[in-house]
Image (cartoon, helix red, strand yellow):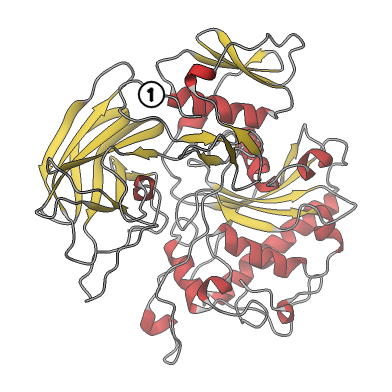
Amino acid sequence: MALTQPNFSLDLTVAQCPKCGANLDVTGNREVIACEYCGTPLVRKYSNQIREVNTNADGKGYELFWDGKQVGHEPNWSREQAIGNLLWNQTQYPDRKVEGRYKGEVILLHDSLFQYILPKTLSLQPCFVVPQGERRPAEDQMQRLVRHLRWARERYAELLGNRNTFMLTEKDPLIYDSPYNLPFYRGLSSQANHITGELLDFTGFNRFSCPLIFFTVVVNHQEDFPGGCGSPFNGGFNTGGGIVLVSSYALDKIPNFQSTVQHELGHAFGLPHVDAYGYDMKTSTSIMSYNLSHHTKGFNPSEMPGEFIPEDVRGLALNQRAFPTITFDRKKNVPSEYNLHSEIRIIRRMEIVGQPTGIVVRTASGEAFSSKAGNVVQNIIKPSMNTGQVSYDAGRMWHSEKSATGWVSLELLFPFIVELTGIGIHTQHSGKYHAAEVVRIFSHTKGEKYSLVKESRLRSVDERVNFTFTKTQYLKLDLKAGSSGYVVVRGLQFFSGSEEIFNPLIPC
């Protein structure tokens, strides 16, 4: 929906899919929009079309209240979907009293949902999800899982020249008894998005604070569902924890389970498939391919095991929370005749059900040359270098329209209140076009107008601007353009003391 936020000059242009929880693109004038992730059609409604709905007499599902009036009822939503929607409404409409009920009980949001400092290190945590009606894992299943993870840990050490490997918790496998059955999970567009939300809630972490990579076995004795997958929670490299999802059927009955473990762990650490770099998925030597010659058999290794190609080592070296002593050196890690791909490819962030979303960015200064204001946060920040070629990237930068006043602005809405002490501001492209000369940073809290935090001349196109401790949920950046009248922002970074928060997808 597009509802006006008090003290903001533009209508909000984000909404959340009620089925999978994904952020929706609600720009334009379409009356019916569809979720690009699960295909769910939704009818656009505006603030003057929203009316109080009938009271939920039977207490089923989720109820949303604004200022004491019920404005929404979703009888078939899960608790995680309800929490996700409540979070979204509370952060977008702070001047309303926003409340939610699930199955007739008031939803109380735990403080852990609003943590934003990333863990220093990551550990792999084996766990089992037991859908309603399924048997809990047997002792031998838990032992086999741990044995597989220890073998994978040793294999990673070997592939990395025994320089480093990931940490594996010494705790017993985590067992989570889900309130949902297998048919429920089959009906989801993404099992990983929902199960991740459940596990984070169960363990008391959120998508930023979690120090774990959940290696998750969903108990299903009848078939290989859900299929194997892996992902970092927040996408990219070094942005926090992650998840691997496999079935107990695969653990028990599929011979090449170990090679699946190694492959999916690579995804959880941030590695994409090798076809992202143009290599053949069937013939590549990388474990991030589908080369059948890499397949293990039980606890017996393949005669032609997979390896890490230079692009893989480069990616793992970026994930210092999981591999703190790995470095990437072109001279040492790239063979003399190897053509290393110039771009670092990433896995996009998960749309985790029941978890905070990212930063919303809006602008009254236009989005020229196919750019989006939202590109400047939690994205890849490319350098501005004069190589004789134009390096403008519409998918990773924001390009303002030409300013009549010489100033352009960005408005930033964080998913919850944060404590900031600095912002990294990256402007200009191609080493010479459209740098900002001055920045004014404004903040405001609930019910207040913007107040100036810092004005600073930008002496570099990559500059960190520090300021006094500021507790806020809303920021506005005014940027003074040069003689061209345009400003290009390649990215923003945010700092809370010595910690970077809402990190870019590749470390800067």
Q: Position of residue 160 (x, y in %)?
A: 52, 74
* Location of residue 263 in the rendering, given as x and y in whole percent from the top left corner: 65, 67
Q: Is residue 346 left or right of residue 82?
A: left
* Residue annotated with mark 1: 5
Left or right: residue 322 versus residue 247 is left
Q: How crowded is the residue under tag 1: few (<14 C-alpha within 10 Å), some, or many (20+)?
A: some
Give the residue displayed 56% in from the left and 79% down from the top.
Answer: 279
The image shows residue 466 at horizontal and vertical percentages of 19, 41
| Tag 1: amino acid | Gln
Residue ranking furthest to the bottom: 337
Q: Is 474 located above or below residue 424 in the figure?
A: above
At 72% from the left and 57% from the top, the residue drawn is 146
Element type where label 1 sits in the image = loop
* Image quadrant assignment for residue 285: bottom right
From where the camera sits, is residue 324 visible? no
Horizontal side, residue 190 vs residue 382: left or right = right
Question: In front here: 387 or 120?
Answer: 387
Front residue of this view, candidates 482 and 291: 482
Locate the C terminus and report the quarter of the image it occupies: bottom left
Question: In this rendering, does residue 385 appear at all?
Answer: yes
Q: Residue at x 81, y 47 (%)?
A: 219
* Residue 252 locus on image (x, y percent): 85, 59
Tally of numbered tags: 1
